[in-house]
Every structure is written in structure tokens, then in C-alpha cells.
Image (cartoon, grey):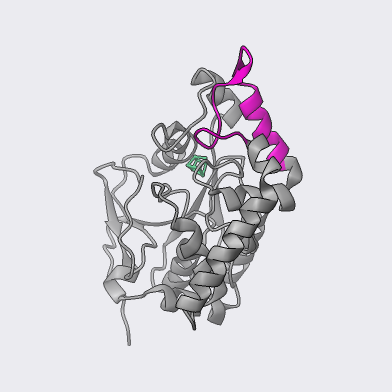
Amino acid sequence: MFKFKYDEKRRQICPLSGGKDSTALAIFLKDKIPNLEYVFCDTGSELPETYEYLDKLEAFLCKKIVRLNSEKNFDYLLKKHSDYLPSPRARWCTIEMKIKSFEKYIGEDLIESYIGIRADENRQGYISKKDTIFPRYPFKEEGIDINGVNKILKDSGIGLPKYYEWRVRSGCYFCFFQRKIEWVGLLEKHPELFEKAKKYETQNYKGDHVCFTWIEGQSLKDIEKNKEQIKKDYQKRMEKALKKQKGKNITDVFKETVNDDDQEDACLICDL
Ligand code: SF4
């Protein structure tokens, strides 16, 4: 019988982001590590679909998911950072709203932390660099790729998070890693959250021009104005990608198409 090896002297922790890979990993590790702790760092700005997905997972695991709330909310932290919105080059939000609460939770304990990077991926990103943390990559260790992850999710009945219909990453509703088509998705699925995100931009007006926007060089007002064109462009790209990648499921092709844009990877603790 397959036996998963782990260090019994260390605390065993599986951080969840609300995304499909960390969820599949939680399912994969169920019953393999008796004292495994499932942990979700809640920024307070997550999508409603993320909470729904976590509740579903919690019921499946029959185990509580520890939810760590960021000590300070985004509005407070934005003021602290002089109204500078976070960006791929200034990811203060990940450190302040995710990593700090995770590091406080683990304290100085020695831990094994399970990360859902798949065997077919070569992702890098922000994770805690504390030297008491020993990172483990079970999907890499066991050769589990995208098809393996999809199978785990399907067989468990958990499936994909609902936001995958219009967005390819977990995390805050205003996450600056979103591509234009995902902002359009937010606008259509959660107009009130889109409005909130837009207000953070207008808060940063200095004189008569926008100083800080979620997308470099473009405001969310522009996205709203150009929404139909953005949808048409993605539709075309999707059709092309689907023809090229016959047999792949539409969600994976959507993710690849969206991620094709030349942009940095999201943070691992937010999006896995
Ligand atoms: S999801 Fe995006 S906005 Fe939220 S903490 Fe992570 S990087 Fe920052």
C-alpha cells in the first residue's frame, strides 16, 4: 500500500489559497497525514466563490480549515503605504495580509509545508522564507500533472471553484495580477466589487490625473469602456487555442490563454 513519508517530529501544514491545485493537494493528502493542519490566510477581500469552495472542501475533509484573518484590513494597509496600490513590483499586500499571519500561526515550530505545484509546472513565487519551514511538493514527488489534479478534483466531487468560469486565479477580488478579461469577469459577475476596486483608483487622484491604477497605464474606467472589445479579443484567442489544443478541457485552455499575456506569476500563497 502507498505510504506517504513525512517527518513526524515536525508540524504538518497544508496552506490553502482557494485555488484548484492547493485544493487537490488537500484532497490528495487526506488520510495520509493524521495531524495535517489545513490553513487559509484570509485577506478579508476574497471572492464569495472562494469561501463557498473552502466550505465545500471542509465538508469533504471532515476537518476544520483554520482561517487566519489578516490583522489589518486592506484600507488600513493602503493608508500605511501612502495610498500606493500594491503591484507586481510592490507586493506589500501578500506580505502584510497573507505571509505575516501565516508566520505568526506557525511561530518558531519546525514545519513541513505542503505546496501544490504540479509535476508539469515550473512556478516560482512568494512563499514564506522562514528557515524553520521545510517545503514539500507532493505533486512533483509523485509525478502528478494537470490531468492528475483534474482527476482528483473530479473523483472527489469537489470540482473547480465557480470563479474559474471567468477568472483563472484565486485571491483578492482586486488582485493586480488579473488580466483584462478577468477584470471584465469581475465587472459582470460582481459589479459591486468592481466598483469598490475602481474607488481605490479614484482615491489616488492627484490633481486631475490618475496616479495609481491596478493595471499599469490603464484605469478600470478604461476596462469598463472597452469591455466588449476585450471580450471579442479573448474570444478569438480562445477559438485559436482550442483548435490547437484539441482534447484539452476548456478551463485549462482559458487559463493558458489568459496567462499567455506577458506578466509575472502571482504569489504562491495567494494563487495555487
Ligand atoms: S491575491 Fe493579489 S492583491 Fe491579494 S494579497 Fe495576493 S497578490 Fe495581493
The residue depicted at 48 percent of the width and 34 percent of the height is: 93
Closer-to-camera residue (30/189): 189
The residue depicted at 70 percent of the width and 41 percent of the height is: 225
Task: Say if 121 sits above or below 244 in the image.
Answer: above
Task: Say if 53 sits above or below 120 in the image.
Answer: above
Q: Is residue 61 visible?
A: no
Which quadrant of the figure contains the C terminus? bottom left
The residue depicted at 45 percent of the width and 57 percent of the height is: 259
Closer-to-camera residue (214/164): 214
Task: Say if 57 sits above or below 15 in the image.
Answer: below
Task: Residue 247: give x, y in percent of width and height.
Answer: 49, 83
Task: Residue 67: give x, y in percent of width and height.
Answer: 55, 48
**Does the magenta run of residues contain 38?**
no
Closer-to-camera residue (20/122): 122
The residue depicted at 44 percent of the width and 31 percent of the height is: 92
Please give the range of residues in magenta.
Answer: 193-219
Q: Residue furthest right?
A: 192
Q: Is residue 249 visible?
A: yes
245 relative position to 192: left or right: left
Task: Residue 100: give x, y in percent of width and height.
Answer: 42, 36
Task: Residue 1: give x, y in percent of width and height.
Answer: 32, 87
168 relative position to 193: left or right: left
- The number of discs equals 0
Q: Residue furthest left?
A: 131
84 relative position to 200: left or right: left
Q: Residue furthest bottom?
A: 1
